Amino acid sequence: MTALFAVITVVIAQTIDNLYLIPFMISEKVNINPLLSVILTLAASKLLGPLGMVLAIPIYIIYKIIVKESYVELINIYNKD
């Protein structure tokens, strides 16, 4: 019975940690919405499994930087004319 309570406690703690604490900590550091970080992680886990969960946020940040910098450069190019 004690082992069952221990397993239930660990499952509840992991669920709270993975679904609430981690997304808020990650989103605070990389400046993205916590809901978006959860959705990205869940979608990547369905597509690529555990590796996708690890790489979802870094890949999103790389694409975000590329799109943002490309937009700034295009604005600079077309504003010169």
Image (cartoon, grey):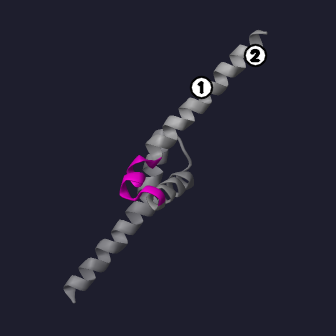
Secondary structure of the magenta portion, mostly? Answer: helix
The residue at which mark 1 appears reads as: 69
Could you classify mark 2 by the number of other residues whose Cα lies within 10 Å: few (under 14), some (14-19), or many (20 or more)?
A: few
Give the residue type that dot 1 points to: Glu
Checking the image for residue 43, the label placed there is none
Q: Residue furthest front?
A: 47
* Quadrant of the rendering where the C terminus is positioned: top right
Q: Nearer the viewer, residue 64 or 23?
A: 64
Which residue is found at the position 62% from the left and 25% from the top?
70
Secondary structure under tag 2 reads helix
Question: Could you say where residue 24 lies in the image, as x and y percent from the top left?
Answer: 47, 52
Is 54 a magenta residue?
yes
Please report the bounds of the magenta region as a residue range.
47-56
Question: Could you say where residue 20 lies in the image, as x and y percent from the top left?
Answer: 46, 60
Q: Nearer the viewer, residue 42 or 7?
A: 42
Checking the image for residue 78, the label placed there is 2
- Work out whether mark 2 precedes mark 1 in sequence or the reverse, and give the earlier one: 1
Which quadrant of the figure has residue 71? Answer: top right
Could you classify mark 1 by the number of other residues whose Cα lies within 10 Å: few (under 14), some (14-19), or many (20 or more)?
A: few
Give the residue type that dot 2 points to: Tyr
